[in-house]
Amino acid sequence: MAHDVILEARSLSIAFGGVRAVNEVSVSVPPGAVFSIIGPNGAGKTTLFNVISGVYAPLEGSVRLAGEDVTGLAPEHLARRGLSRTFQNLQLFSRMTALENVMVGRHRHESTGTLAELLHLPSVRRQNQRTREAALDVLARVGLEAEADRPAASLPYGALKRLEIARALASEPMVLLLDEPAAGCNPVETQGLRNLIRSIAESGVTVVLVEHDMRLVMNVSDRIHVLVGGRSLAEGTAQEIQSNPAVVEAYLGIDHSRESARAVG
Amino acid sequence: MAEFLQFFFSGLTVGAVYALVALGFTLIYNASEVINFAQGEFVMLGGMGTVFLALAGVPLPLAALVAVIIAVAVGVALHRLAIEPAGDAGVVNLIIITIGASIFLRGVAQVVFDKRFHSLPHLFGAEPLRIGGAAILPQSLVVLAGAAIIVFLLWLFIDRTLVGKAVIATAANRLAARLVGINTSRVVGLSFAVSAAIGALAGILITPLTLTSYDVGTLLALKGFAAAMLGGIGSPMGAVLGGLLLGMLEAFSAGYLSSSYKEAVAFLVILGVLLAMPNGLLGRAKVERV
Amino acid sequence: MIVRLAMRYRLAPVALVAAIVILLPLLFPSAYYYRVGALVFIFAFAAVGLNLLMGFAGQVSLGHAGFLGVGAYAVAIGPAYLGIPSWFGIVAGAVLSALIAFVVGRPILRLKGHYLAVATLGFGVLIAIVLSNEAGWTGGPDGMSVSRLVLFGWRVSGADTWYWVAAVTLLTGMVLAYNLIGSPTGRALRAIHDSEVAARVLGVEIARKKLTIFVISAVYASVAGSYLALFNGHITPDVAGFLRSVELVAMVVLGGMGSIAGSVVGAAVLVVLPQTFTALHDYEHLALGLVIMAFMIFLRQGIVPAMVQWRTT
């Protein structure tokens, strides 16, 4: 079944200690698109991600995934319906190897009984083998196949960012939420990231991106949604956003020197 | 009614001691996130120290003072020699270290003191007062008054002094506290010292009523920990509330249900409360930041 | 060499322990040593199970001796009052422990950190209280005697027999543990330990996984409890007490959280040390406390992981 909207948030709100971090925000993400959410620091972008991915329950509003109401569902159930994500401040399994991290990403596609696992039956061996191969494929896709057996904790920062994407990709999501994947990456890594995001979208996975690197956002996005102070300010294509006076002013009003320059530039 | 009052007072008295032990847990936890299972040993040191100093001919008030000083010295040594060198070892490691410390202190106590039960004279005699048909020992009132004074002084110290502010700051955010120039290691050391003093005082106050021996600490640590968690770890008011509640629960279930199941009832209630309120009665929920 | 082998082959540590088990009796001057050995293996078995819960899934239990108690009293009460054979008592105890763990674990495992610690502690204390108060069944604080284990007409008695029975059981338990760690569930558990939220967004049903491992570790403890009771021929409620729970946790941490072989080493240290220290008479506790503190301060990641690190660097 095809939908013209794969992920939809309707007037979502959430409050912490009386402060509305996200206030009546609505977004509609078309399938296969790269949909970016931008805004100054504290605009509520990550919080919106946390609500959509089920980490926080919304105060008001609803979330629909592929036409079904999934409001308030736990992250693990959303994951089983095809929504996965990465984290702004990395949440890797640091005591496991890079490969094992990605293998955990395959979890929802694995089917072995506990008893079979305790006895290490052939079915478990075959499952492990399949999971391992699939995980290696995904690692290769993000260019980390050489680091497969290294402990995650020993990888450089840029590699960890890609490892998190690989891990989420391994779960074969319909929708992938990426929370600031370019933060802390150098220009070369960012360029690689752009290509990766595009290729993910081209493979049919919808990408929702929260990102501060405006060049990357403008380059990669099909649509851009602007949040300011927890509220929606504007939405449109890269060109529309860049020429939207309200957006420019919002950035100018908050940070004169950097973000505004990047937002317009 | 007389029966109810009787249980109420005995629950309150025991609860006051649990509250003081729980307060010790809370102080150290707030400063360092360490759960100090040797907390009960401070209570033992206070009681046993006073008993043996008095036996050696030291006048009682002086004996009590010296016992508290000994407990404080042990508390500071525990921090310096065992907690600080362990550095950023995991939570469970630190718990095991403090349990090791409590086994060690018990071992020392059985060598330095002995394995018998001891008591101390009641401060105002052992003639019970009649209140509403219930018989209350004056020492019970001493325990309650003592506990109230300790809690009040502690509140004054934390709320009104600069050192107290440093303690609050360290509890709120250790890194930030360090950045504004607070010597957090000294704050943690101080929390061990104060917790030891509170524990020792509790031990001295309660010994005339419940006796003491080298191994009273284990059970008290268990109860104090449970009380602190019941109230919500990190909250001093929660610790006091949790302690008093635990004492009451035990006294009433011993009185009305069965004395052999009083601890079972107490723990059942704690389990029930935690399942309904996963952060204890007064503890604050943490918002997970990802 | 050994470390490199252990890294290459999943079950190499089991082979190593098996070799030690076989060679050790050559050095035993008396039957007493078989006794100590059997105790080490029994406690190691419980510690391996607890390590699955603590070291791999990252969930603390300060009440696991409660399951030791269930297993121990199942082989004591079953044959004495219900007329079931001892071996069936082991099975019944394990099933009962699994059931209790399943029912209790559901709500308790939602708690985190110190709250989980106090909830499990309370649960263990509850079992110990029931065992010492239901004197009609359990003999109260004085405990009760346990009839010998008979397997297919073979009377299992004597320290040397138990040495071998406990050893085989431990080795089996280790193999099962290694199997589980290398399985999808094992990976999911280790993931939960490092980041619950990341595991959840990948579809790991953390509540179910935690419950599964809690039940499994309870069965390990229960079987160890049954063995302990059958081996000693007498049992008291102390087996389920708080100090026993702490001892099990200490074995896991001392040997190394997340190291199966470590749990065996941890159990060996904490069973053998007190036996040696009895020569110190009154100084026994003092010495034991000091040693535990010293290990935790200087080998904070545990004995076996520290050894592995030392060998590989």
Image: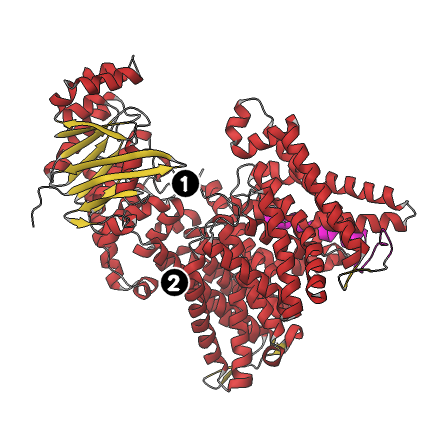
Q: Is residue B123 magenta?
A: yes
- Chain letter belonging to callout 2: C
Q: Quadrant of the C terminus of chain A?
A: top left
The structure residue drawn at horizontal position 49% and vertical position 41%, both measured from the top left corner, is C310
Name the residue tied to disc 1: B287
- Chain letter belonging to callout 1: B
- Measured as percent of width and height from the top left, residue C64 is found at 52, 61
On the picture, is A137 further left or further right than C50?
left
Name the residue tied to disc 2: C176
* Amino acid tagged 2: Leu
Give above or below for B108 relative to B117. Answer: above
**Residue A73 in view:** yes
How packed mark 1 is, by other alpha carbons closer than 10 Å (few <14, some 14-19, many 20 or more), is few
**Res C162 → quadrant:** bottom right
- Measured as percent of width and height from the top left, residue A187 is found at 23, 21
Q: Is residue A225 magenta?
A: no
The structure residue drawn at horizontal position 81% and vertical position 53%, both measured from the top left corner, is B113
The structure residue drawn at horizontal position 54% and vertical position 43%, both measured from the top left corner, is C300
Magenta part of the protein: which range? B96-125
- Measured as percent of width and height from the top left, residue B252 is found at 64, 64
The structure residue drawn at horizontal position 45% and vertical position 60%, both measured from the top left corner, is C49
Q: Secondary structure at mark 1?
A: loop
- Measured as percent of width and height from the top left, residue A114 is found at 32, 63
Instruction: Decide which of B33, C292 is in the foreground and name it.
Output: B33
Give above or below for A78 relative to A197. Answer: below
Figure label count: 2
